[in-house]
Amino acid sequence: MQNNCAPQTIGITGGIGSGKSRVCRYLAKHCHLPVVDLDLICRQLVEPGAAGWLKLKENLDERFFSPAGELDRTAFRTALFADNELRSRVDTLLHPLARVGMAERVSNINGPVLVEIPLLFEAGWHKDVQLVVVVYADPAVCRQRIVERDHVTVEQARQAVAAQFPLSEKARLADQVIDNSFRWHDTCIQVRELAERLGFRCSFF
């Protein structure tokens, strides 16, 4: 594929613990591509006084907020993974706002952009991008990474993985797949091959 045929909006997704953020940063750094990060957009949305925070404050129990009004992110995240009904309600409140924020940021970028969207398929946003890259990892590997990274129990890690679409299903729906189950060196080789297929001008060495 030639450079002038490269997709303009590349959605990077995967599952919790799959390493999608690391892959996205690596591709962005070496191919000089801007990134729109949905996790960052969502964090900004739930800052005190922001539109998402106002929605949550109106619709959720006060136990998720500190006396100063800040969202207790740890308790909130734990509850989301354990409660399907709560997660669905929060998604209904925040996803429309996050989608608008994503579209605004993408529209301000001239040229190809990486859009990191953890819940791309769950939210039904796969048609908002021109190409979907799924970063896959074996579920057992994902669980172990979550335990080590977030200092949670194995059961909490299992709940976090189970709360999302199976990675095998995401990989089946993807345009391109990066397998990040093994050594980072092996993953980097796949990313470089992907960049070449997409026609990006990169400097990996």
Image: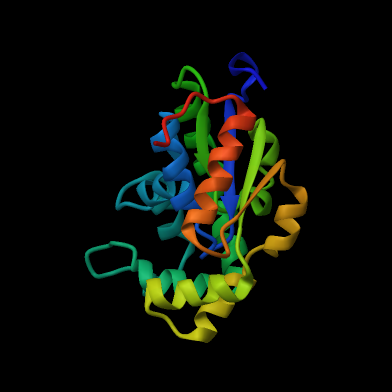
Q: Residue furthest top?
A: 4
Please give the name of the residue rendered at 45% of the width and 21% of the height, measured from the top-left corner. Answer: 109
- Is 37 drawn above or below residue 140 in the view shown? above
- The outermost residue toward the left is 68
- In this view of the protein, which residue sits in the foreground, 137 or 108? 137
Q: Which quadrant is home to the N terminus?
A: top right
The residue depicted at 28 percent of the width and 62 percent of the height is 69
Nearest to the observer: residue 14 or residue 162: 14
x and y percent of residue 189 in the render? 54, 47
Q: Is 165 on the left or on the right of 153, as rendered?
A: right
Check the image and report above or below for 4 versus 10: above
Measured from the top left, where is residue 120 in percent x and y? Answer: 62, 48
**In x, y percent, where is residue 10?**
58, 34
Task: Evaluate whether residue 170 shows in this view.
Answer: yes
Say whether residue 76 is left or right of residue 196: left
The total of numbered circles placed on residues is 0
Colour basis: rainbow
At x 50%, y 48%, the residue is 188
Name the residue located 60 percent from the left edge and 38 percent from the top edge.
Answer: 194
